[in-house]
Every structure is written in structure tokens, then in C-alpha cells.
Amino acid sequence: MDANFIPVERVYKEVALQDPSSNRIAQWLDKSVVGGILDLSHPMIPEAVQGSYTITALTDKGEQISHSFDIKEYVLPKYEVNVHLPSVITVLDQEAALKICGKYTYGKPVIGSVKAQFCRNAIRFFWFSSPQNKDLCKTYELTTDKSGCATQTVNVTAFSLHKNMYSDTFEVTAEMEEYGTGRQTKSPTVHRTNTHYAYGLRRPNYRASHHHVTPFYSKSSSFLKVMQASSELPCDSEATVRAQYIIQGEELEKGQEVLHFFYLVCVRDCDVTPPKMSVPLTRMSDLAPFAQVVVYTLMPSGEAVADSHDFPVQLCLNNKVSLKFSSLQELPSERTTLSLKAHPGSLCSVRAIDQSVLLLQTEQELTVSYEIGLKIMTNSDVKKPYDCDELTFYVTKGDRLDSPIPLAFNMMPEPVITPQMFKVDNKKETIRTFFPETWIWDLVTVGDSGLVSMEKTTPDTITKWAAGAFCVSSVGFGVAPNTGLTVFQPFFVSLTLPYSVIRGEVFTLKATVFNYLLKCIMVKKQTNNHICFLQILCKVNLKVSAEALKTEALCGNEVATVPDVGRTDTVIRTLLVEVTNSFINETFSSFSLLLLPDGVTEKNVSLLMPELFVAGSARATFSVLGDLMGRAAQNLDKLLAMPYGCGEQNMLLFAPNIFILNYLKSTGQLTQSILDKATHFLESGYQRELTYKHDDGSYSAFGKADSSGNTWLTSFVMKSFGGAQPYIYVQPEHITEAWRWLSKHQRPDGCIRSVGKLFHNGMKVTIALFKWSFLIISFWCFKCSALDKSLLQDKRGTRHWKRAGASGKGLDSLEVEMTSYVLLALLSGPSMPGFDLEYSSGIVRWLTQQQNPFGGFSSTQDTVVALQALAKYGAATYSSEVGTTVTLTSLGGLNKEFTVNQDNRLLYQEEKLSEVPGEYTIRAEGQNCVLTQVPHRYVCSTPSTEVFSFLNRDK
């Protein structure tokens, strides 16, 4: 939208979705905005990683905006708790009324117990070594009344109001437990509200008031004042501003009867208007949020008399949008109408979400006062999805409304469930199965009438639905005030369920029947408790029914009533059953295939499981990434770094910028924005490194403060400065002077004598690793197999070199460096028989498995060397001519094709594998290098050292 909130036709060059590991899991290229809103969607896989996902949009003008959303496990709260206190408590007060209220999302009061703590905290000083004052706190245990509130009179004199060693605010925390939902520590439906109230203590401290007056002088004693308005000026109607003046008659010319006044109304520009004293203001919505009114006149003597004033204007948008349900309350599964009014031709986004979601996390709402620009709309929180088979169990509740039903999930054989076990009479029954968190999420076009009606069926959740909308059209942007619809029935059953249970865990299922009828009802007692045995991971459908019984028996002292609608309420909710025991979560880093197709390449893969794995627990996916440096290229903000520190640290951060730029340039992926950022980093590092230069041309960690330059650092600077020359200006003398200094320390055998101190441990180790790596290459040339066998680790298609004395636990940063140097040596020299790109691919496979989610490695130094090696390999295997097609097939009939081309080479393409264990064939056809990965996880019933097997057999 432009400055006037008019939608602008724009093309989004790229819209990308990244997971918490910064993998790009979806992208859309060159998408045009239709009607002012770009609508995109992406399905999430059942095994979606928990964490923060980011949507980033890049316009054709280089503008970028991002928005994040979370996927996590949670249970929605059912009610909110509010704490009420007087706005001010003074030192003269002796008592204060504390009121704590709970209210369900459907508006009814919560019956339960409250634990409240009322505190005045002591002021603590960190420099005091002696014991300090303790907080003054009182705890109250209360019970709510029928209105859902608990009240307590607090004796505030017990909180030392006259002492200044305590805070001038009270802190109140309250915790409410719903009656009948069980123990607080076990029930996931117990919701805590820790509301901090900071109410000032007013002390008798009356300060003097000052008003500064600035004298104003007029030679003609003529004055003008623009009168202030009593409130904000309206935005939807005209307004009038008045001005008062004092003009001395003798200052006018003889016979002059009229003196003209002029005014300007300034918003973005000032418009001069013909003279008037009563200033009319029109088009008020264009003046918001402030209008500056300037009134002036010119006296015959040439003196200017003027005044100005800023008037706040109510914020309004030109597109008037309103939203309304046909009624404020509806029954579950009933038809309702949502009416939307907006300017004809508007495109509107409409959403309605469960009020419980807003209790879980407050949503940043669009309002008129919101700083409106590009807005990415998503669901507030996305519950972690699951996709598994479902089993159904039935429980019929009787008149014991809050009696627990024990359920146990064990590893015994599943019982045979027959319809005869559970009989439900064919009566006026409501069966509730639809419990979404987001009910409406639609794009709607408003016709010529300016009104559109949407017919909807209400969900089965007993709650309030918060609805909102925003619209864009040729006249501008508009936001509808929030509206709500309460879905409610006076007699219903509610289940208290955790997010999930662990297989083998015995837990208490609690079902509570709510009766909001005016009369007493009798509930039929018919409870069937069943022990449920599950062998696999799944979602269990729990069915609970409560039926109002028609009987002549007295209910208390009155005749029992039966609801006309909803005599029997049945709820079917799902419960996730998980397995914990020996949970193994292997990442894709252990199972990667780097495919280098030269025409057609085919590999067979076997996914094998250990004997003790739990059936149904295996999860695996197959992914394809078309760029070896894809993750590093996507996270340049985290890899391109501003050099800083001493001469050694500065160069360790300086060098990776060159490697990444070289790779992007050689592959045609270098953009101007990346080049500008990297250039800035290189220029800064270049200037900083010159401060560590000696007069003889050498370099050391602390410059001239050191007695001499250092051999290794000087050579590293010379190499890095030379590599940076294509991107920044480097004075050639700095390179030649370093070379001359190194030449002075060259021995007759050609080696450079070590001179000076090297402080950075990474650089010290690098010297040794550099020697070891080239020794390995040298011994290969002379066919020395002993060293090859002692250092080379060749497993599962990967190849790296092990450091002598390594612990073998976790990632060894030094092994990454050593292996990277070997790869650099292989790629830098002439091609040797048996050591071609196919051989190097095994090294690259191992290095890519060691990368962190951002494409880097475990330390600065190994990242420097490994990225240089990977960039060199990526440039050697890069091809922009044609794409590559990867086909995944299985014995079970899977046939999934992935296309990798120039447009989607950074896209992390993924497919869920349903056959685990299973046999798969990966076929790559084309010319581009592609990286395939197999993330997986499974569960063992007992701790086991046997791991998930991943075998590949080349054809």
C-alpha cells in the first residue's frame, strides 16, 4: 500500500518459508498481488519440528519483511482469571478490597478455589553485604461464589506503608483451580494467572507547580490566538476551528473597514485558503492524525500577526468495514450468518478463532492505529500436527458428574470392540466432534452492493469465537472492529485432557457435566469403564455421553426437567498416545547422499530397523536440496561477519566473506545486496588489519606492540588481501611488502622459518593440520597405504580423516579442518588418477553431515576452512545449463519426482516416507549436483545400542 493506504500492484520476487533449522521448506517465486492481498498456503507434515518458523517476503523493489509463527505442544485454557484492586492505595488507607474472578470463554463464571499472594517487596541493594529486609507477603486461600469471584479484605497496615525500605507498589499473584478437575500438579487444565499489579502508594508530598510564560511583543499591540478544541476532531464529519484577535483601530488605514485574515491547514502540505476567521476543516480523514492550522494577517504597517495550533484528529480509514453475526449466541453445529460490509469491490480477509487461543497468547491485532504496512497474516499458534491411525473408545457418563474414569495404556493385545458393548439410545442427542482452533480463515470479495453474507456452521466447541476482518479496495484500506459469537448450550459435558499421554501410563480421565438450566435435571447413571491397551502410537478417540433422564422422581425438592434440545450430549475428543522409553531421534546428518549425475545415477537404499523398535513409531522423510552451499547461502547474515578483535581474530572473520562471495559469483547467484554487505565487511576488516602492520611489511596479533611480525599471520594476510582484491581496493604495496618480508625468512630448502608469536589456538592447530593434510596427499602419491589406513575413515559412502588421539565423542572440529584441507588440496592441484570429483564427493558428503542448521560448523576456524573447500567443490560441480530430476521409488509403489533447477535450488523439498522399514531407489538424471537426506526417528521398547541402519548399494 502507498502512503494513502491504496493497494499497489506489486510482484513479490520471492516468498520463502523456513523451519527452525533455517531450512527453506517452501518458496513461491514472482507472485503478483491480486486485489491487494497475496494468499498462499503450505501444508505441514505430521512430524513438523517444534519451534519458530519464519515467512520472508521480498518485493521486486528489494523491500523485505518477515513474520514468524510457532509450532508447539499446548493445551488451550478454558477460562481467564482477572484480579481487581483499587487504582490507588494511600498511606491513610487501612484496608483494600481484593477481588479475583474467573470466567469461561463462553462467558459463564468459574467455580473453584483461589490461592492469592499479596506482597510488598523489599528494596534490595546489591552493594549491601549485611542481611536485607524480606518481602512482606500474605497468602490467602479463597473459594469463588456463584458469580465466579472470590473477595478478600486485605489489612494494608500490616505492610509497613510508612517505611521507605519497601517498594511503592503491591504485587498480587493469583492462581485458580477449577472445581472437579483434579489435582493441580497433574491436571493440564489447571491454568495459572500471574497478574502483576503495580499500584502506586500516594504519599502526602505536595510539590510546587510552575508555568513558564514567554512574553510576546507587537509594535501595533495586535494579537491573534487560534482556540484549542476541547477534544479530538472527528474524522467522519467537518469541523470548525475558531480564532480570537485584538486589532487596534488606529493601526488601520483611514477609511479601512475590512482586514483580511488567511489560514493554512497543514498535513503533508500547506494549502493557503481565502481569508476567513471561522476556519472550516473538510476531508477530515485525510488530516489524521494531526492537522496544523496557521492563521495570520498583515497589518498596513507591514507587521505580520499570526498564530498556529496542532489539532489531533481521530484516525479513520476510507474503507469503512464492519462485521456482524446474525445473532450473538448459537447452539453447536447450527447455521449462522456472518455479514460483512465494505466498499464495493473490496477484497477482504476474514478470520474467526477460539477465544482460548487469545488467552494462550495475545494476538497482535490490526487496528486503525496500527502502523500499517505490509502484513503477513498467519494463525497465531499452530499445534504440532500428528498423522496416525485412530481408535475409538466409548464411555457413558452417569449422575456422578465428576467421578474419574481410569484408563491404562499398556503393551497388551488390543481388545475386540463390538457395537454391542456400547448402546446409545436414539434420542435427542447432540454429538460434538468438530473442535477447531481456527474456524474461519477466508478471502471474500464484496460485490457492488457493498455487503456480503457468509453462511457458516458453528463448531462444536463451547466457547466464544473472536472474528475480525480487514479489506483493501481502490478507495483504500479498512479494518472491522472485532465482533464475537458465543457457541453455547445450557447442558453439556466437558473433558479435561492432557496434550498427550505416554504408553503404559495410567491417568485419570475427568468428565464434567455443566447444567446452566434454570431447573434441576436428573442424569442417568450408566458408566462403562474399560481398560484400553495400545501397541502402537496413535490418536485415541474418547467418546463420553451424558443424558438427562426423564423421570417422576424428585430432583432435590422439585420435579426434574428435561431439555427440549440436547437431551443427550456426546463428546468425541482425540487423545495422542506417545511412547517415551528409549526415544531415539536421529537427524538427517547421519544419512546423506550426494548425487553427482552425469546423465543417470541410481542408488538403492535400505531402511532397516533394530529388532526392539516399537511398531508404528518409525518416522522418516526424504529431502532434496539442489545447492551444496544452500544452507550457508540462506544464512549469510550468520556467516558473513563484521571483522573485529586483534590481528588474528580479525582475519579469521575476514576470510569467510571472500569464500562465500567467490562461490556466489562463480555460480551466478551473487546479488547486489549481498555484495554491498560483504564489501562493507571486507573494507572494515581491511582497514582494521592495517593497524596491526609493522614497518617491515609483516603483521602480528597486536601490531607494533609485538617485537616482530608473525610468519603465519603475515602469509594469511597476504593470501586474504589478494583474494579480496576483486571486491575492494587493496593497495598492492601491502601484498608485495608482506611477500618480501616472508622471502627474507625463506630457508634454502624453500620452507619459511617460523618467526614471531601466534596467540590464537585455532591458527596454531591449523599449521599442524595443514602439514598433516598435505602429508596425506604426498603419501598417497608415493602409494603409502599404511598412513592411509591409519587415518582414513571410509564408511557408508563418506570419507574423512581421523585425528590421532581423538575421543570419538561428538564432532571433532580439528578433523573437520584436516579433512577440509585434504579436499582443498585435491581441488587445487592437477587431477590425479583415482582422485577425481567422484572421489572427492565422499569427503563432501561427510563435511555436509557436520554442518549446523545455518550451514556453518562448530567453530570459526573450521567454518573458514570447510566453507572454502565446499565453495571450491560447489563451483567445480555447479551447472546452470539444465536441471536435475530426482525420482524416489519403493517396493511398495511410491513414485515421487523432484525437480531441481535454477529457480528452486535453495528449496528444501521433502517427502514423508510411509514404508519404514523399507527398500527405496533414488534415481537422479541431469547434470546438477544434488544433496539428498533422510531424517528419521523411531522408538525402542528397551534401551538399545543398536542404531537405525541406512544402507546404500550402488548400481
Image: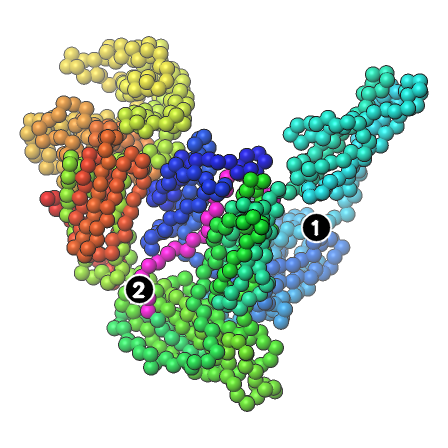
Identify which amino acid the numbered label 2 is placed on. Answer: Asp
Locate residue 657, reporting x and y percent. 34, 26
**648 horizontally vs 151: left or right:** left
Query: Of circles 1 and 2, which is in front?
Result: 2
**527 horizontally vs 94: left or right:** left
The segment highlighted magenta reads 366-391
Locate residue 488, reporting x and y percent. 54, 68
Instruction: Name the residue carrying label 2.
Output: 389
917 to 689, vertically: above or below:
below
Depth check: 812 or 329 in front? Answer: 329
Q: Secondary structure at mark 1?
A: strand
Most extreme residue toward the bottom is 552
Q: Secondary structure at mark 2?
A: loop
27 to 191, vertically: above or below:
above
Q: Does the segment drawn in magenta span residue 870?
A: no
Q: Is residue 421 visible?
A: yes
Residue at horizontal 64 percent and vertical 49 percent from the top: 167
Q: Is residue 81 visible?
A: no
Instruction: Name the residue carrying label 1.
Output: 201
Query: What sort of colour scheme is used for the picture?
Result: rainbow
Specify the quadrant that holds the C terminus.
top left
Identify which amino acid the numbered label 1 is placed on. Answer: Leu
Residue at horizontal 62 percent and vertical 42 percent from the top: 317
Locate residue 32, reporting x and y percent. 43, 38
Most extreme residue toward the front is 448
Locate residue 533, reporting x and y percent. 30, 72
Q: Earlier in the sequence, mark 1 or mark 2?
A: 1
Q: Are marks 1 and 2 in contact (CB under 8 Å)?
A: no
Label 1 to label 2: alpha-carbon separation: 60 Å
Main secondary structure along the magenta-highlighted residues: loop
Residue at horizontal 39 percent and vertical 66 percent from the top: 574
